[in-house]
Amino acid sequence: MQNPVRRDYAKLNSTKPITQNN
């Protein structure tokens, strides 16, 4: 089972250019 949070972030990244890879 993959983390739902990570998937959420991926979706957000798809819609918004969020750079949370620090």
Image: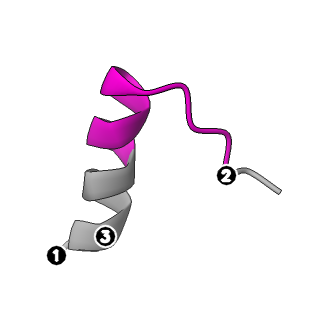
Badge number at residue 5: 3
Quadrant of the rendered structure where residue 16 is?
top left
Question: Residue 13 vs residue 14: left or right?
Answer: right
Please report whichever mark, 1 or 2, sits nearer to the chain's N-terminal start. 1
Q: Residue at x 27, y 54 (%)?
A: 7
Please report whichever mark, 2 or 3, sits nearer to the chain's N-terminal start. 3
**Residue neighbourhood size for the residue with mark 3, other residues' Cα within 10 Å, grouped as few (<14), some (14–19), many (≥20):** few
Instruction: Name the kind of residue labelled 2 in the image.
Output: Gln
**Residue neighbourhood size for the residue with mark 2, other residues' Cα within 10 Å, grouped as few (<14), some (14–19), many (≥20):** few
**Residue neighbourhood size for the residue with mark 1, other residues' Cα within 10 Å, grouped as few (<14), some (14–19), many (≥20):** few
Instruction: Name the kind of residue labelled 3 in the image.
Output: Val
Q: Residue at x 21, y 69 (%)?
A: 4
Q: Residue at x 67, y 51 (%)?
A: 20
Residue 15, percent across and down? 32, 24
Mark 1 or 2: the one toward you: 2
Residue 21, percent across and down? 73, 50
The C terminus - image quarter: bottom right
Residue 5, percent across and down? 31, 70
Which region of the structure is painted magenta? Answer: 10-20
Instruction: State the CA–CA distance, disc 1 to disc 2.
Output: 22 Å
Question: Residue 10 vs residue 11: left or right?
Answer: right
Proximity of marks 1 and 2: CB atoms separated by less than 8 Å: no
Instruction: State the CA–CA distance, disc 3 to disc 1.
Output: 12 Å
Proximity of marks 3 and 1: CB atoms separated by less than 8 Å: no
Mark 3 or 1: the one toward you: 3
Q: Which residue is mark 2?
A: 20
Badge number at residue 1: 1
